[in-house]
Amino acid sequence: MKPKLKSILLIDDDDATNFYNSYIIKKTEITEKIDVALNGKDAIEFLTNKGKFFSESNNYPSPSLILLDINMPVMNGWSFLEEYKKLDPAQKAEIVIVMLTTSLNPDDLLKAESYTDIKEFKNKPLTSEILWEIYDKYFNK
Amino acid sequence: MNTFQTYKATFDSNPDSLLVVDNTGKIVMVNNQVELLFGYKSDELKEQHINMLIPSQNIEKHNEYVKQYFESPQKRTMDSDKSFKIYKKNGDEAFVDIQLNPVLLKENNYTIVAIRDITEKVKSKEELEKAKKRLMYTLDNMLEGAQIIGFDWRYLYVNDTFVKHSKYTREKLQKYTVLELYPGIENTPIYDIYLKCFVERVSIHLENEFVFPDGSVGWFDLSFQPIPEGIFILSIDITERKLAEIKLISQNKELIRMNKELEQFAYITSHDLQEPLKSLISFTQLIQAEFGGKFDADFEQYFYFIRKSSERMKLLIKGLLDYSRIGKNKELTLVNCNNICNTILRNLDASIKESNAKIQINNLPELSGYEIELGQLFQNLISNALKFRKKDISPIIQIKAEKKKKHWLFSIQDNGIGIEKEHFEKIFLIYQRLHNRNDYEGTGIGLAYCKKIIDLHKGEIWVESELNKGSIFYFTLPII
């Protein structure tokens, strides 16, 4: 039995996608915990214990893995990455960001490669194979 | 009347200045003209050496000349090409021509010096020379090509720029005629222009595409001007501009074609995508009707997402289809904006009552536009103002129009949630949404739709807003 990840954060505005991804992740039993943010702003608040995720604790959630969508209202994936860059290392530690998107636009792939925080660029739908591939590559060392 | 008086009168009335000088160079006698020309009284000159009237810098040369002259006195006649500079008593300079006439009087050699004031002539000749130089300098150095062609088709004048334009050397241009240098020119339209200018003596301005003997092509802006010697042609090389123009035209055509293709593409795809989607929705309805409640909670949950997603897809595709259809089968009519808005208020009656909204419409104009599209524009903007209201405050919406010089300026003001400045542009792009669907339902097409309608009317649309304070959407419709 491989050791489980601490937590995975899903950032996507679509309820159906979040439901489906949570379902796949649960099936793989790869993580202890799944959190959901509906857009980039939600996600930043979650990572920094602010807004509706307010907590006085200095223990930031710092999930092991983030699955990030591109097109979202309020704050999209690219703006999230810009904000994420500015975060305190304690808030972003140990995070591997995988861009998970329906985008078939090669420009998006090129743009994603310019962000060092993005480790992988995968198309939806999420599968258990994708999850294990990420696990083996980044966590099973 | 005695003879002396007659001679004296003749002497004085001579239009030239006359001096009688003895063989030592001493002035013996002067006439009235001398006084007038030099400004000296005759008493001031008499018994003085002739050098008194010679500019100091020329005295040495003059002495030499005088010496030579007296060795063998010879008549010197006026020579219209030569002029001498003299100074008057007051220092003014003048130009004169001089005649020397040796005479023997009382066994002594005298010389009658006739001095003619040719200052005017010299000055005007100088002016003419200057003007000619200025003109030639200008012609020679112009950025435009300049050429003068004689009636025998020979180049009488060419400047450096024209030499460049001609693609020949100056030597060749001087040696050969236009017809020899550009064989076949007789069969081109430009030949008729030459003839017209040569024969009918008219000025002609045109842009001409010229094929050089080496096959290369150049474009020139040409001005033909008849002149006494033949014709004068001014040429500007506009090849680069023309090439850029041609490129621009072809790019423009390509852009129009691609835009049409894109519109067609959006229309076809959204239309065709509807087919399988309709089946999907029909069958979910069928399953719901026949099997609803017969499966477990997980099934219900999954089924819920299928239904929700397909309904959302239907909305998105419908939006795209409508968007791509804007401006198709359009018809320009006189549109009464008051009537349009009143109809919309009736359609929105339920949501107006539900939100307890107050909508004030100030007298709106009647204008030339696309009625259906303008209706959709108002519908979108008013329903947005209703939708993005603050939770606990009833919406107040004000619709106004103001007549400007060239257009009507409309504004739709609300007291809703407002928009952050950074999103002012983005909201008009298709599928851009600022809010989560759980907070405000929508496809993100509405304002893109409005933008396209306003583009269609060649107007502009923009927003001014402050977060939590409300928004004002402005748009202009040109007065046709």
Image: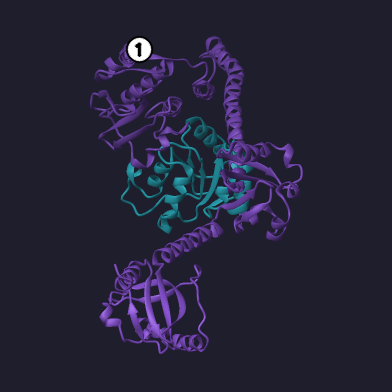
Q: Residue at x 37, y 66 (%)?
A: B15
The image quarter in which residue B444 lies: top left
Q: Residue at x 46, y 35 (%)?
A: A13
Which residue is labeled 1 in the image? B347
Q: Residue at x 55, y 16 (%)?
A: B281
Rate crowding at label 1 as few (under 14), some (14 to 19) or many (20 or more) other CA atoms within 10 Å. few
Question: Which x, y percent locates residue A88?
Answer: 40, 57
Q: Identify the image quadrant of the N terminus of chain B.
A: bottom left
Q: In the figure, is residue B91 to the left or right of B103?
A: left
- Depth check: B78 or B199 in front? B78
Chain A shade: cyan
Chain letter matching colour purple: B
Is residue B264 placed above or below B39 in the rendered structure? above
Does residue A131 appear anywhere in the picture? no
- Depth check: B86 or A34 in front? B86
- Depth check: B417 or B88 in front? B88
Mark 1 residue type: Asn
Question: Which x, y percent locates residue B271?
Answer: 58, 19
Question: Which x, y percent locates residue B50?
Answer: 37, 84
